[in-house]
Image (cartoon, rainbow, N blue to C red):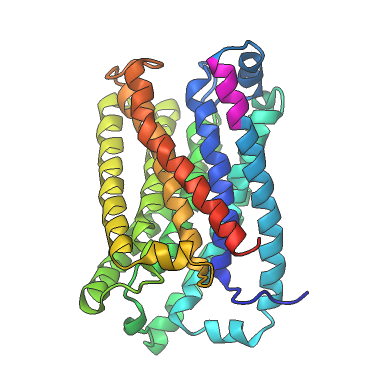
Amino acid sequence: MELREKFNPMCFLAPLGAGGLSVSFFMYLMFLVPHADVPMATFNHIFPELIKGGWLSFVIAFALVFIIAFAYLHFKLLILMTKQFNVYKKSAVYNKLIGTNSEITLMTIPLTFAMTINVCFVLGAVFVPNLWSVVEYMFPFALIGFALTGYYALKIIFNYFSRLLISGDFDFTKNNNLSQMISIFSLSMVAVGFAAPGAMSHNLTINTIGIFGALFFSSFAALLLIIKITMGFKNMFEKGISVEASPSLWIIIPILTLLGIMMIRISFGLDHNFNSNMSKSSLFTLTSVIVSLQIIFGLLGYKVMKLNGYFEKYIEDSKTNSTVSFALICPGVAFMVFGMFFINFGLVFNSVVDKYSLVYFILMIPFVFIQFKTVIYFFKLKNKFSL
């Protein structure tokens, strides 16, 4: 098998984006299909509603088509990129990567495999009847899966930082962006994965392991976030942002989504098994702060990319390709996903807005709009790279 031109670890952002889009369409089922008896909508809730007819049946059918389509693209692209990476590891280009700032881009690999576990969980929930009756037996395997991806991520990042601390050869001249925060994105993905069994399991041991794993990886992510965002903005203020790496300004959006969902899950987990009474108002304040920061970084990134001509050069121009362009997909996915959490856990949960009311659906419009703009950009980039 030949190595594709300009392949690098950032190419894993393509299957990551497809997986994220698949999960984003599950949000319609998660929050619009009634499932009072369990924490998430499953086959047993979805398919009875699907055959009833009416507007909800249409939404379910619509969501299912996109869940399947993007899950298929996720696995197709994941297999392709994994094969390419195995070839890439034997090349001189890979040896050159190790020992530079760009070594951190290897963190896209555990990040993408952690997303694969989430996609599998969504597919199982949606298409396997009576899954919830055996879900407690699945949680240990989920913990093992996220532990393995977490180990892989830690191995990469400790190799990277130990080299830097010994040699002191970090190239600050090439750090005028936030691409280094891909490491935080990866750790946050592992953290939110651990938080799922931590929130939903009724077994105290599984619950505890999940919450500890989530706190372990999120603590590391928070520590690195302070370091990386400070260094990145310092270099951008001094040298101006690298045009090609401009989408990195939006990387904080998926990080905030993952850490926010993790905190919500931990709150539910502590409420279930640790006798910690969860405050509904805290969910409103948490989701409000996160959505506010996402809007701020979203507007800032968009303004910068419009001024430096990023969209014209790297999206619309067929002659200029950059694998970093796939970094545009995750922020759109993340904003839509957390928007649904904000509306449902921040507002509906606190009786600010009634579920299924006109205001409820109006509030969904901006998040749905961003989701579909993201779908359009995904296929533009997919066609551009002939994937």
- Reply yes or no: does residue 370 show up in magenta: no
Q: Position of residue 234 (x, y in %)?
A: 23, 73
Q: Nearer the viewer, residue 199 or 68?
A: 68
- Residue displayed at 27% across by 51% down: 299
- In the shown orientation, is residue 361 left or right of residue 297? right
Find residue 296 and report its horizontal and vertical position in percent.
25, 50
Magenta part of the chain: 55-63
Which one is in front, 325 or 156? 325
Rendered-image quadrant of the C terminus: bottom right
Q: Residue at x 45, y 28 (%)?
A: 273
Where residue 53 appears, x then y in whole percent?
62, 12
Q: Is residue 47 visible?
A: yes
Q: Residue at x 49, y 38 (%)?
A: 198
Residue 349 image-quadrant placement: top left
Q: Could you tell whether 24 is left or right of 181 in the image?
A: right
Quadrant in which the N terminus is drawn = bottom right
Q: Quadrant of residue 279?
A: top left
Q: Residue 225: which quarter of the image?
A: bottom left
